[in-house]
Image (spheres, rainbow, N blue to C red):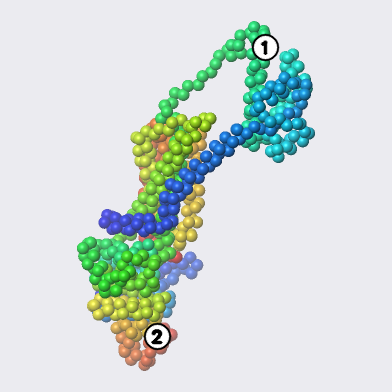
Amino acid sequence: MITARHLTKTFHDQKRGAIRALDDVSFSCQPGRIFGLLGVNGAGKTTCLRMLATLLQPTSGTATVAGYDVMAAPAKVRASIGFLSSATALYDRLTAREMVEYFGRLHGMREEALGARLNELFVALDMNEIRDRRCSKLSTGMKQKVSIARTLVHDPAVMIFDEPTLGLDVLTARTVLSFIAQCGRQDKTVIFSTHVMSEVEKLCDTVAIIHQGRFLGEGTLSEWRERTGLRTLEDIFVRVVEAPR
Amino acid sequence: MNLRPIAIVYAKELRDLLRDRRTLISMVVVPVIVLPAIMISLSFAATKIVGQARQEIPKIMLLGGADSPRTVDALRALHAFQFVPSQADFTNLISDKKIRAALEIPPRFDEAVEKGEPAVIRIYTYAGEMKSVLAAETLEQVLRQKRETIVSRRMAERHVAKELLTPFSIEKTNVASPKKVSGNLIGMILPYMVIIMCLTGAIYPAVDLTAGEKERGTMETLLCSPVARTDLVAAKGLVVLTVSLATAFLSVSANGLAVVVFSKVTSHAAKNPLPPMTLDPSSLVAVCVVMAPLAIFLSAAMLAIGLFARGSKEANSYMQPMLILAIVPAVAAALPGVELNYGLAFIPILNVSLASKEILTGTFHWNYLAVVFFSMCAYAVAAAGAAVAMFKRETVLFRT
């Protein structure tokens, strides 16, 4: 489970001064449900998810992930999550197996359990052929599969996806999306940020809209339709972000 | 700090680096093959060129001497020179390397010598031009021998003992042990070489493991793991240190071997062969002890700079001036007259260079050595602290 309470993040820029990237954001995500964070580029989605993953510290407010406070127990938070974003790349000079093994070890897995988990993941993701191939030699789709295996190796209870399909072709994006859906079915707590409306419509149980660092509301797609009287998510999104505040 | 994750990250980073052709080139190929090969080929080329120049019979222009046949005939009889007819523009001919030198014999030189009157023989040469200088040296040597012969003859004619001219002789005796002599020579070169190679060896891994990771997007992947950031810095720092020390060790061994091989091969031909190089193992251990905190300091400093940079290019542009900054004190230590004192013992790099120089000559000023060691430890801790602080700064980690 993820609970964010009044999360705020301010960056300081030499030219522009203080920039509030995230402003008093509160929400919660439940296990077995996919929580979609929808917003345009620069809305604050990445900042929010990086704070949940303890890569950034909140300026104020707090969050708990899998029962651990992001400020008080960041290592335990990281041990409980799988974080996948378009920016989380692979080590080119490691093979697919070495890459996944490395992260398993970093998560404190013992060799025997790691070996078994590796076999399970490589079969499930159909990666046995590329097992000993260096990551630099893999296609984008295969690389994404290795990244997925890397995030899943320690079987985390919480999955955080930050625009994971950004820059991917249709087929690779489908693999990633089906993997996200599968995580939901496995009772994991899933938070998924994107600016692609169709992905949210297809996957998310709850849709939250974020704009200019502010949280503009959350609900199921039918709740949003009821609230706005509009049909498509795109229309709903535009209405919400353009509404006078 | 937790040793298990440090060991895991260390093993992975080292494996990753050793699979990179650029690491192998900077760590193995350049110090073990390229540098010794350049050194040996340049030395062989220089020896060959000097040898050829010495074997050449130089063209000498004889100016005057028609009325001094005894001197001229004696010079010709040596067959050490190829004499050419005199020309007015002999200075141009020397400058254009058409002839090596000119020998001006004053009018009635033989007659003046016979009468015991003073006379001046002039040698015209091209200063700095090796073959011309060698020709002039040979001419001077021949003329000096002729002068000595004349002096001996005159003294014999006047029944004056030879010893009158040399009331006493001077003898120089080296009291320094061979260890001190070779230690002094090695002490000038070894610390400089180790420091420069440590730094050169640290640059590439430091950039690759920090700015390079940010650039490639693997830093964020790594930061998602539960490993503490202090442990990540420790592991990365240890990898930089390992590569840096390996580069220095390989470089010193390979170049040392090259010097030994070269001096053995050319010892028969060398005019002043190098004294036998011996190193006391205990001195070598002491040098390693003094060098250790410096190597840690350099690795940590490089890591902190790499972390601060946005990308590899920026990191490299920060590190090149660092290399120059490090060369200056390393070279300063080799200058004559620069010796370790309390003030210099606090200046990083210079202090270790001077301390190593002293240790290698068998001099142990424990008070200075303690200041050098502990001040370098303090600098190393400060640099490591800076690297950890840099690794904890969000603004530094996520700016690209």
Query: Of residues B136 and B375, which is closer to you in this image?
Result: B136
Q: Which amino acid does label 2 sit on?
A: Phe
Q: Mark 2 Cα within 10 Å, few/some/many (few <14, many 20+)?
A: many
Query: Of residues A243 and B112, which is closer to you in this image?
Result: B112
Quarter the C terminus of chain A occupies = bottom left
Question: Can the viewer see residue A228?
Answer: yes
Residue lying farthest to the top in this orientation: B159
Give me the residue at 63% from left, 20% from top: B145
| Residue A5 location (% of width, % of height) | 30, 74
- Residue A73, quarter of picture: bottom left
In this rendering, is residue A166 above or below B263?
A: below
Q: What residue type is labelled 1?
A: Arg
Q: Horizontally, is B218 left or right of A157 in the view? A: right
Give me the residue at 30% from left, 60% from top: B228
Question: Which residue position is annotated with label 1?
Answer: B154
Chain ID, mark 2: A
| Residue B295 location (% of width, % of height) | 39, 46
Quarter the N terminus of chain A occupies = bottom left
SS at mark 2 in the image: helix
Determine which of the numbered discs, if any, sits on residue A33 in the image: none
Give me the residue at 42% from left, 43% from top: B254
Give me the residue at 35% from left, 52% from top: B238
| Residue A50 location (% of width, % of height) | 35, 70
In this rendering, is residue A108 above or below B120?
A: below
Q: Horizontally, is A39 left or right of A127 in the view? A: right
Q: Mark 1 Cα within 10 Å, few/some/many (few <14, many 20+)?
A: some
Q: Nearest to the eye among marks 2 and 1: give it.
A: 1
Chain ID, mark 1: B
Question: Which residue position is annotated with label 2?
Answer: A237
User: CA gap, disc 2 to disc 1?
Assistant: 119 Å
| Residue B388 location (% of width, % of height) | 36, 56
